[in-house]
Image: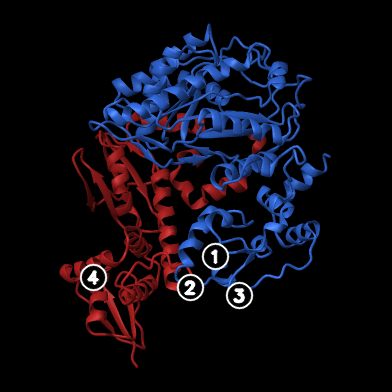
Amino acid sequence: MRIRNLIYDGSFDGFLSTVFLVFEQRITQVQIQSQLHASDSLFHDNEKVFTDEKKANRVWKGVEKYSNSSGSYHLYYAFLSELPGIENVLLQYLQQLFAYKSDISKDYSNTSVLQVVQTAKKVSREKHRMEAFVRFRLTKDHLYFASVSPDFNVLPLIKKHFTRRYSDQKWLIYDIKRKYGLYYDLKKTEMIQLEFPKSFDFSRTDKDYFTDQELDFQDLWQNYFKSTNIASRKNLKLHTQHVPKRYWKYLSEKQV
Amino acid sequence: MSFERIKEKLNILADAAKYDVSCSSSGSKRSNKNKGLGNATGMGICHSYTEDGRCVSLLKILLTNHCIFDCVYCVTRKSNDVQRAAFKVEEVVSLTMNFYRRNYIEGLFLSSGIFKSADYTMERLVAVAKKLRLEENFNGYIHLKSIPGASDELMREAGLYADRLSVNIEIPTKSGLKKLAPDKNFEDFVKPMDKVKNEIIQFKAEKKIIKSTPVYAPAGQSTQMIVGATGESDFQVMRTADHFYNNFNLKRVYYSGYVPISNDSRLPQLGSAVPMLRENRLYQTDWLMRFYGFHVNEIVNKVHPFLDLDIDPKLSWALRNMHEFPIDVNTAEKRLLARIPGVGMRSVHKIIYARKFRKLNMDHLKKIGIATNRAQYFISCASNQLQLPDLTPERLKSIILQKSKSKYTGLLSNQLSLF
């Protein structure tokens, strides 16, 4: 039988709408792909699925009915990993969930459950890393600005953390890879898209944009970082295990 | 402010504070109020790691490294020829706020050398915390050092602004303390700890009746012991830790391998290795006591006063108690699962949930994440009804060691060759 290749718009609602379609039409041979990553294939045709919020909500209601809260957030977290093929694992999980009609999120000897749980764990680790490694720099217009390019799409997950914590300063966390940001204007936090000047270099603290003191504080922090180290206990392996090199670009203390 | 001058002070006073290993920023319940800055609920965050692999979570500094005491093990001791400096209250407040706003830190860990008197010093520490809380509306994490000998009134006030308070007893035995810190006495350490303990108990009792009772040190108390400075045994260290956990409701005891900083003949010589592996084994023991349901005497005692360096303490215990095994992972209760070498508490919980769906076999267990290289000799499950071959514990230990690669191999051969 032909495999149907369903393409959705990349949003979580889009994915859930696709799941709705699979159940509605009892499709058995199926592959779900995001249009952001879809590749044309010679062997099957791509079918575009339209995002329908109502259908998506019905699927999600079902998920919440049968899962406990950690079960449903695992699904969302795993989805945000954007890993190729994760949609198909999530579909298998959902098919089993709706067949079993009770929480399966702790069935760790079930392959798709374990895969979802482990992927969710990876995403949650990345979320935590962003909460740790985001570094704000104060711009001339009193905005605390940070740029990131996380492995997974974790901005939706860190919104609450930063909103609670930095409620008395304007801030913007911008995902360079996915080209959108979280912006807090002292009242609410929103997802925004914005254009940067061509000359803007995210890795530099340019005096044209940032306050004069900004580099001084970075300098103080670098000094602190050096002074608090105990040289006779040096353990670079442990160090890079905790701060993998791909994150160094965010950290002023790791710039030479 | 003058950045150059601040930088100089920061270098001196961060350098002097770094031997305090605690950097925990978790366990507080202080949430953001009135749109202030910061939030200290729930888990801690390590914003960076030093090159020695330790978490950088708090701005950890001394208010000053001027000190009237002459404790041999301490870099800040009066007789040591080092540069001295002192922060002003406003300087610490400004650094904390500016670092926090940039998401460098979770908060402040403020300690101090003792200048003039215990109370005079404690008062300054409290002043910093108070200013941060009341004037800056700062809701991040604050860890203050309880200065040995500080008055009850000051300790009471400290707990109103700080999330955590700690006194480092530093030397695990009274005799060691007498030898290395002749100006200090044990009671001075215990007094503020006792006060804080009682305040926390009182707070919890009052909170039940009056909801608006101001919080008192919500992240509790901790202490630190230096190991490897006075020839103490692991049994002595862990017994002291156990005593403090039980009698002062401590949240944490930290173990700090002695870093040679002095050529005093009473201490290990400059250049001798920091006992990092031993330190790690002590932490593992601490975890076994606090989370795995072990009693300290099961792991270290008069007969086994030192922990094995080449294997972890749970495995050592298991090898001494082979009659407790095999444990059936599909039926055993939580307490017993926690005793299997190679199975951590996370895996224990996963096993308990997963086995409700089907009987678990070795393949499942491996995927769940248990360390089967150790665990396989101690469990029975759906795929193996373990007939423990007649292995002596010594033989089993050498099989496990041969089959596993320890990250400590290099360190171990180094440390063992010292004996």
Q: Which residue, given by chain and number where applicable, does mark 1 sit on? A: B331
Q: Chain of mark 4?
A: A
The residue sitting at 34% across, 43% down in the picture is: A146
Residue B229 in percent (x, y) is at 72, 27
Q: Chain of mark 2?
A: B
Q: Which chain is red?
A: A
Residue A38 against residue A120 in the figure, above or below: below
Nearest to the eye among marks 1 and 2: give it: 1
Q: Is disc 4 surrounded by few (<14), some (14 to 19) or many (20+) residues within 10 Å?
A: many
Q: Amino acid at mark 1?
A: Thr
Residue B52 in percent (x, y) is at 60, 39
Mark before the other along the chain sequence, 1 or 2: 1
Q: Which residue, given by chain and number where applicable, does mark 2 sit on? A: B358
Nearest to the eye among marks 4 and 3: give it: 3
Under circle 2, the secondary element is: loop
Under circle 1, the secondary element is: loop
Q: CA distance from mark 3 to mark 1?
A: 14 Å
Nearest to the eye among marks 4 and 1: give it: 1
Mark before the other along the chain sequence, 3 or 1: 1
The residue sitting at 33% across, 69% down in the picture is: A102
